[in-house]
Amino acid sequence: MPEYRAVREKFGFLELCHHPQAAAEVTVTAAERLGVDAAIIFADILLVLEPLGLGLQFSAGDGPVLERPINGPEDVERLGAYDVDDALGFVYEAIRLTRAALAGRVPLIGFSGAPFTLASYLIEGGGSRQYLRTKAFMYQHPAAWEALLALLARVINAYLRGQIAAGADAVQLFDSWVGCLSPDDYRHRVLPHSRAALAGLSGLAPVIHFGTGTSGLLSLMREAGGDVIGVDWRIALDDAWTAIGRDRAIQGNLDPVTLFASPDEIRKQAAAILARAARRPGHIFNLGHGILPQTPVDHVRALVDAVHEMSAA
């Protein structure tokens, strides 16, 4: 969005995250410009890693990088819990400012990365395709792996509680890269920590639990927790809902690249997803992963308008 790019000319990415007034501005501008039914606070899933002191940076073209990644159990032993409210209070302030600016027009969603996804960044030092270092660490150092994910789960739970207390109407746990795991590895090495990260939150606000490449993990993600399970585009929505269980809500699941198609094709793809939802209560129409920076803004608005029109018909 040009409005966002104008703000970014004044702030680096992390600097913008740390500036509550600017973060609130871009959050509200996006929600109003696109006409969506909820706003999501401008932040990043990795902000909870910054206070660990491993040198989190965002480099142009390369995404997030940690200068001092975890290489062995001794690096995990050096990590310590921190005062979440003190270290991440700027996110809470952005939520308070955004909530006031939205004035009840749409709800506001807060979020965090999930234990596995955060651990993968800590160990890989950035993004990855194979998650070789992460999986090798998980297999070779099981005690350190458990300690790392337990620490992250405690931090995430406190962070999401703080967001809810600041005014977030719902929160989302992003397990963006957990789809690289087998069901058994997820069940035994990740699920307990995702469950701990989400413990007690549903009693405070609705919780969305999202991952990508998770077609074989959906029933396990339900077991880990969440009032809503998010799904990507690699599985049909109704098949995913059957795997999750109809007593849970579902979020998804348009391929973000569809937004580069013509408005007619975008409408056709959205209609197919809505047909699979079959007007059952509990479907949140959404993309199956993050929106791409090059996406035409008018195509996003065309999607929003089409979903509103077809849902009301």
Image: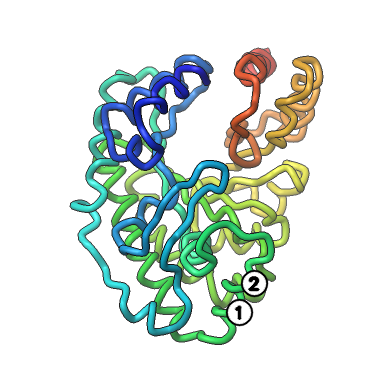
Residue 66 sits in quarter: bottom left
- Give the image location of residue 18, x and y in percent: 29, 40
Q: How is the image coloured?
A: rainbow
On the question of residue 55 being in view, the answer is yes
- Give the image location of residue 59, x and y in percent: 48, 46
On the question of residue 194 being in view, the answer is no
- Give the image location of residue 289, x and y in percent: 62, 41
Per the rendering, the mark at residue 3 is: none
Residue 86 placement, left or right of 11: left
> Crowding at label 1, few (<14), some or many (≥20) Cα neighbours within 10 Å?
few
Badge 2 vs badge 1, beta-carbon distance below 8 Å: yes
Q: Secondary structure at mark 1?
A: helix
**In the image, residue 197 above or below residue 262:** below
- Give the quarter of the figure containing the C terminus: top right
Residue 251 sits in quarter: top right
Which residue is at a point 50% across and 63% down the rendered structure image?
A: 125
Which residue is at a point 51% across and 50% down the rendered structure image?
A: 174
The residue indicated by pointer 1 is 136
Residue 21 placement, left or right of 309: left
Give 229 or 72, whichever is nearer the viewer: 72
The residue indicated by pointer 2 is 132
User: Amino acid type of disc 1?
Assistant: Ala
**In the image, residue 141 above or below residue 190:** below
Q: Secondary structure at mark 2?
A: helix
- Give the image location of residue 31, x and y in percent: 46, 21
In this figure, what is the number of numbered marks?
2
Give 69 or 259, whichever is nearer the viewer: 69
User: Amino acid type of disc 2?
Assistant: Leu
